[in-house]
Image (cartoon, grey):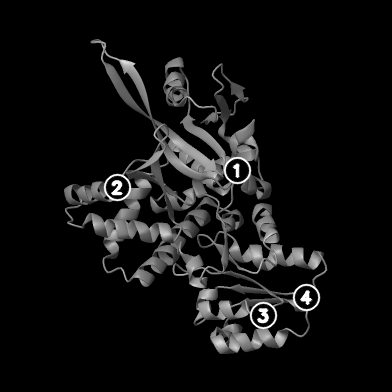
């Protein structure tokens, strides 16, 4: 089964021979190795690159153990380069290579070498990975499968695919698991034995129970405003734990650096400034979030909101939580200010979109509630409400567009309908 990841493949192709190290980052098991060793490899061969000009080394392969030595790695790569044509050097699990930063910078001194790397532990997946290469790296951020990618490889209908996707998420290997039990076991084991183990080992976390509890709280409250101080109070009142807000902030930073969760900060739309704490946290993959909670808290509205947030980020947007004040008069004719929330403010360069995740709007009152923050913004950027039901795209007199979530996810141009 081949899953097309054309968006990422095209990003690699655009960066070909740009003189930088192409660094593919992303949460473990999202498909980084497949992108390089299969899709990019096939692309190179299709355009006539000889097989001996593609140097591929999987450092987690036992047979390549000696190449984890930096000097032997450099010697091996240089021995493979025998002419002046371009050689493509592709290294997987590069964190297993001793002194890998120096090795990669040394490879850049080879004039006809084009270097691509990926890695899968929390050290390499940290968000400051590019600084490891002294400003000579070019990051390609990879995510689990979007719903559009998921449907392209799913054997059933789009409706059936949605049920699976919203339950088990978009890690590619989920598509190879045949039963709900197999899918659940895979995700639960992956979370505990791979993701959290990486974080604990890297950061030498001494109190694993506190980290586990924090992950559970974030999973239960996905999309809710929170802060380290608020979390510390929760630990104190419910868990009878005196963990500090500073420690909790460190733990959250560990989770975001490993791309398990993402932080969306509040943005004052009219004041054009960031507000900071509290913020919202979303999971990189909803299947991992659901598995962490043993698939018990399956609130479709919150999961749908998380999926929409991820989709906007997959499309390359910076995503914030919008705040806008609505002015009015009270019964004493005094001016009042009511803070209203816009779920997502998505920006990319000069582009900007306001997106509400409404789940359902069964009554005029509910529709008015969802439209009110968008109407209060008062600028000309596109405003969209995404609902659960499969409805035709419609636009009201104020220009607000309403569409079904599957339309939004499946149409790559849905923000511009």
Label located before the other in sequence (3 or 2): 3
Label 4, label 1: how many angstroms apart (C-alpha)?
37 Å
Query: Which quadrant holds residue 280?
Result: top left
Depicted 301 relative to depicted 25: above or below: above
Query: From the viewer's perspective, is the residue at label 4 or at label 3 nearer?
Result: 3
Dot 4 and dot 1 residues touching (CB under 8 Å): no
The quadrant of the image that shows the N terminus is bottom right
Residue at 20 percent of width and 52 percent of height: 239
Circle 1 residues within 10 Å: few <14, some 14–19, many ≥20: some
Depicted 318 relative to depicted 41: above or below: above
Query: From the viewer's perspective, is the residue at label 3 or at label 1 nearer?
Result: 3
Circle 2 residues within 10 Å: few <14, some 14–19, many ≥20: some
- The mark found on residue 227 in the picture is 2
Label located before the other in sequence (4 or 2): 4
Label 4, label 2: how many angstroms apart (C-alpha)?
52 Å
Q: Residue 240: in sight, yes or no?
A: yes
Q: Residue furthest right?
A: 48
- The mark found on residue 161 in the picture is 1
Residue marked by disc 4: 51
């Amino acid at each position: 089964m081949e899953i097309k990841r054309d968006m990422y493949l095209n990003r690699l192709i655009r960066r070909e021979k740009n003189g930088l190290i192409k660094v593919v980052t992303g949460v473990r098991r999202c498909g980084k190795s497949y992108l390089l060793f299969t899709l990019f490899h096939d692309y190179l061969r299709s355009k006539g690159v000889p097989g001996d000009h593609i140097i591929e080394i999987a450092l987690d392969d036992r047979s390549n153990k000696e190449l984890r030595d930096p000097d032997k790695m450099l010697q091996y790569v240089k021995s493979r380069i025998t002419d002046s044509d371009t050689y493509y050097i592709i290294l997987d699990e590069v964190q297993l290579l001793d002194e890998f930063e120096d090795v990669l910078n040394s490879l850049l001194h080879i004039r006809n070498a084009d270097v691509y790397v990926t890695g899968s532990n929390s050290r390499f997946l940290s968000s400051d990975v590019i600084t490891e290469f002294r400003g000579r790296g070019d990051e390609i951020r990879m995510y689990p499968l979007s719903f559009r990618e998921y449907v392209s490889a799913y054997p059933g209908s789009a409706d059936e695919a949605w049920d699976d996707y919203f339950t088990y998420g978009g890690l590619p290997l989920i598509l190879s698991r045949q039963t709900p039990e197999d899918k659940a076991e895979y995700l639960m084991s992956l979370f505990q034995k791979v993701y959290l183990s990486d974080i604990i080992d890297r950061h030498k976390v001494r109190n694993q129970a506190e980290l586990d509890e924090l992950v559970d709280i974030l999973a239960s409250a996905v999309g809710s405003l929170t802060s380290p101080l608020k979390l510390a109070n929760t630990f104190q009142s419910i868990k009878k734990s005196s963990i500090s807000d500073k420690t909790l902030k460190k733990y959250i930073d560990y989770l975001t650096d490993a791309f398990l969760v993402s932080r969306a900060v509040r943005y004052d739309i009219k004041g054009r400034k960031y507000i900071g704490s509290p913020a919202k946290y979303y999971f990189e993959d909803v299947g991992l979030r659901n598995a962490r909670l043993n698939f018990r808290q399956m609130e479709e509205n919150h999961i749908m909101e998380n999926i929409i947030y991820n989709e906007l980020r997959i499309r390359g947007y910076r995503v914030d939580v919008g705040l806008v004040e609505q002015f009015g008069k009270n019964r004493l004719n005094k001016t009042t200010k009511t803070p209203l929330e816009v779920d997502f403010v998505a920006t990319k360069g000069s582009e900007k979109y306001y997106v509400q995740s409404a789940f359902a709007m069964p009554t005029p009152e509910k529709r008015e509630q969802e439209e009110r923050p968008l109407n209060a913004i008062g600028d000309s950027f596109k405003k969209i409400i995404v609902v659960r039901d499969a409805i035709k795209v419609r636009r009201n007199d104020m220009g607000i567009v309403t569409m079904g979530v599957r339309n939004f996810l499946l149409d790559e141009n849905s923000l511009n309908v």
